[in-house]
Amino acid sequence: MDKPIGTNEPAWAENLVTTSLPQLAGNVETDVCVVGLGGSGLSCVHELLKLGQRAVGLDAGTVGGGAAGRNGGFLLAGTSAFYHEAVAALGRERARRIYEITLAEVGRIAAEVPLLVSRSGSVRLAASEGEERDCDAQLAAMRADGFPVERYDGAAGIGLVFPGDGTFNPLARCCQLARGAIELGASLHEQSRVESIVFGEVRTARGSVRCRHVIVAVDGGLEYLLPELAGRVRTARLQMLSTAPAPEVSIPRPVYSRYGYDYWQQLSDARVVIGGCRDRFRDAEWTTNPTPSDQVQSCIEHILRETLGVTQRVTHRWAASVSYCNGILPVLDQVRRGVWAIGGYNGTGNVIGAIYGRMVAQMAVNGSSPLHAQFMPQPGEKAEVGTVTPYSR
Ligand SMILES: Cc1cc2nc3c(=O)[nH]c(=O)nc-3n(C[C@H](O)[C@H](O)[C@H](O)COP(=O)(O)OP(=O)(O)OC[C@H]3O[C@@H](n4cnc5c(N)ncnc54)[C@H](O)[C@@H]3O)c2cc1C
């Protein structure tokens, strides 16, 4: 393994002007306080502004400093479960509605930050004969419902191509969303860790926000900030690394393999960004410690060298916390009076997190959300069955 790199800085931060926002100091009053300024919280802030609300956003660290700015950069339609699994668990109609909404959301994100998104499609690569059969089942279910999917049989192996998917610089998107929200009147604060939330008041070490609603949009660590959610979500660490430009390989589309446990892509400047291996050290990775570990980093580097054939040096190693829920659909709940929570994206929150951010804003302010209604079972439809996610196998 290359020498560990100590900064825990994601490749996405390179050449990026990040935000520098004031810490919350003193007592302020607003309509809605959003806790967590990742992709989900910022999507929520924008929706609140659209709904005519005054919004204050607080982050313990920096904008996009959690998983939202430190992830693989994949924009994948669907839930954390593959489409045929979602059909089995949610029923065909409900799975179809949700897939449609997420596919549209990839387009929405591309329209929101066009310079940061590539609609490259994505590849699911089968790592075994069993997974090839699983790809066949996914292909059949998606085709039956008219969703874009093709067989992949190429240099990298056998699998599926999803032309509707894409990639982006996730940290740059967070920074852009934060700047846009401030221009529209939101008050956002970094280095402002929320220590307690009581009805109508959010407290940090140096200030407090009095408000009608609190929305907690914290993926990793959610069950610690809101202990009511312990048992429904569980925090885990995911890790990645990136290399210097690697002209010796050509990876035209982002790839995920081994049921999504391992994933990689090559950026436009030829750097390779790769993550995964969490399942190989599952016990150790159920942790709130968001720093890279030698064993997972070595495992990822093995795939980089042996499977992808990349010889360039590793330049960045990083990790972040996410949370897993008990099923396919993440948590969206009013956990205390006036306190709402979203999270538990099962390691794939870029797209669905943005949707959940909008849904929770609508629910908190209006008491209902047409978008949320689409996610819920309609009369005659079953509630979720089973607890299959790509990460709980
Ligand atoms: C290595 C890795 C790779 C991944 N790859 C992908 C991928 O390719 N595609 C995909 O869709 N998903 C991916 N994910 C998952 C995805 O990044 C997350 O699901 C998503 O970013 C969650 O966004 P969020 O805004 O809900 O949470 P976060 O980004 O975690 O934001 C929460 C924010 O809350 C703040 N916070 C926490 N506690 C407090 C507190 N007490 N007070 C105030 N603020 C607080 C944190 O500082 C953080 O900034 C990956 C995750 C990781 C870690």
Image: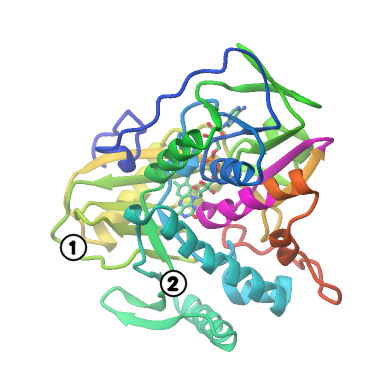
> Is 230 above or below relative to 209?
below
Q: Nearer the viewer, residue 59 or 262?
A: 59
- Residue 11, x across and y down, in percent: 30, 42
326 to the left or right of 275: right
Q: Quadrant of residue 253?
A: bottom left
- Residue 329, x across and y down, in percent: 68, 59
Q: Which of 216 and 140 is in front in this view?
A: 216
Q: The C terminus lies in which quarter of the figure?
A: bottom right
- Residue 182, x across and y down, in percent: 49, 33
Crowding at mark 1 (Cα within 10 Å: few <14, some 14-19, many 20+): some
The residue where tag 2 is placed is 164
Q: Closer to us: mark 2 or mark 1? A: 2
Q: Is residue 357 magenta?
A: yes
Q: The N terminus lies in which quarter of the figure?
A: top left
> Is 106 above or below relative to 146?
above
Mark number displayed over residue 249: 1
- Mark 2 or mark 1: whose residue is earlier in sequence: 2
Q: Is mark 1 on a helix, strand or loop?
A: loop
Residue 372 shows in this picture: yes
Task: Write the residue at 52% across / 40% down.
Answer: 38
75 to the left or right of 345: left
- Label 2 is placed on what type of residue? Gly
The response on whether ligand 1 sits within 8 Å of label 1 is no
Q: What stretch is highlighted in magenta?
A: 336-360
Q: Is mark 2 on a helix, strand or loop?
A: loop
Q: Distance between the residues labelled 2 and 1?
A: 24 Å
